[in-house]
Amino acid sequence: MPAQKLKVIVVLPAYNAAKTLQKTVEDIPRGLVDEVILVDDCSNDETCRVARSLGLTVVQHTENAGYGSNQKTCYRTALSHGADIVVMLHPDYQYDPKLISHFVSLIREDYFDVVLGSRIRSRRETLAGGMPLYKYYANRLLTLIENLASGYNLSEWHTGMRAYTREVLEHIDFQRNSDDFVFDSQVLFQVIEKKYRIGEISVPVRYAPESSSITFFRSVRYGLETLGVAVRYWLTH
């Protein structure tokens, strides 16, 4: 398929993102992106109103179904709208949308099937960008274990900025994954199992008070579920 015909859709899995949504959308390279789809997981703020005012395609869950469920809706919707490349971006402005052009280029030029935005270059930069110390070390530990289980050497498994080809999303069974935060790790293990090519781009770390974040106890639960996914993959491959 000629490069100029590839349809690029950005999906935003949103929950209470009203404060950061406009900044995020304004930095998306519109000349490159054909459509921006926001899936709202039953927010209790003005996320949907802001999204519609910005001209986004809005899909609204009638009840809070979870982060993984939100992404499932994102990907199903993007595929049904004819996407060739799907970029998943958290709408909390923690990741720089201007870098989308580089994600798309690496896929469009057929270097990779999946591209991840890694926030980990050095401990100093990551912590200076505002990532909490406990999250940094948990990220490092989980990534180490997931790399050992999979045989890969990715610098970060827990990023909220990723790009996929249509083929990848059509051939991994993301629908059977968790509706919770461990969804992201499950997807990467599925990508690895199918032997798709994974690339990484360094992205700046920028935590802010309005950025989305799960509680410490939810983080612990997420970590334990992630370990379970890694162990199951290691035992079966």
Image: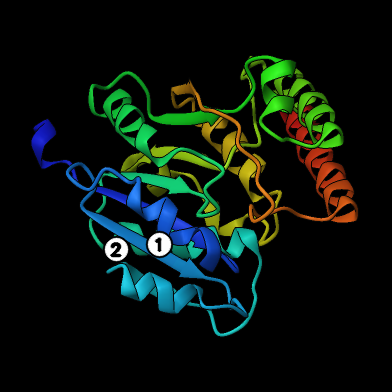
Tag 1, which secondary structure?
helix
Residue 92 position (above or below residue 151)? below
Residue 50 is left or right of residue 57, and the answer is: right
Q: Nearer the viewer, residue 228 or 162?
A: 162
Residue 113 seen in this snapshot: yes
Residue 108 is left or right of residue 64, and the answer is: left
Report which residue position mark 1 lands on. 76
Residue at coordinates 51% horizontally, 40% vertically from top-left? 95
Q: Give the position of the N terminus as an image quadrant.
A: top left
Residue at coordinates 83% horizontally, 42% vertically from top-left? 223
Q: Nearer the viewer, residue 54 or 197?
A: 54
Residue at coordinates 75% horizontally, 18% vertically from top-left? 148
Residue 44, image x and y in percent?
Answer: 62, 80
Residue at coordinates 73% horizontally, 17% vertically from top-left? 124
Residue 236, image x and y in percent?
Answer: 74, 31
Q: Give the position of the C terminus as an image quadrant.
A: top right
Number of on-image labels: 2
Residue 219 position (above or below residue 137)? below
Residue 1 seen in this snapshot: no
Tag 2, which secondary structure?
helix
Residue 128 position (above or below residue 58)? above
Q: Which mark identifies residue 80?
A: 2
Q: What amino acid does circle 2 point to? A: Ser
Q: Are marks 2 and 1 in contact (CB under 8 Å)?
A: yes
For the residues marked 2 and 1, what is the alpha-carbon distance in whole angstroms? 6 Å
Q: What amino acid does circle 1 point to? A: Arg
Residue 52 position (above or below residue 201)? below
Q: Which mark identifies residue 44?
A: none
Characterize the local packing of mark 1: few (<14), some (14-19) or many (20 or more) Cα atoms within 10 angstroms: some
Residue 232 is left or right of residue 162, and the answer is: right
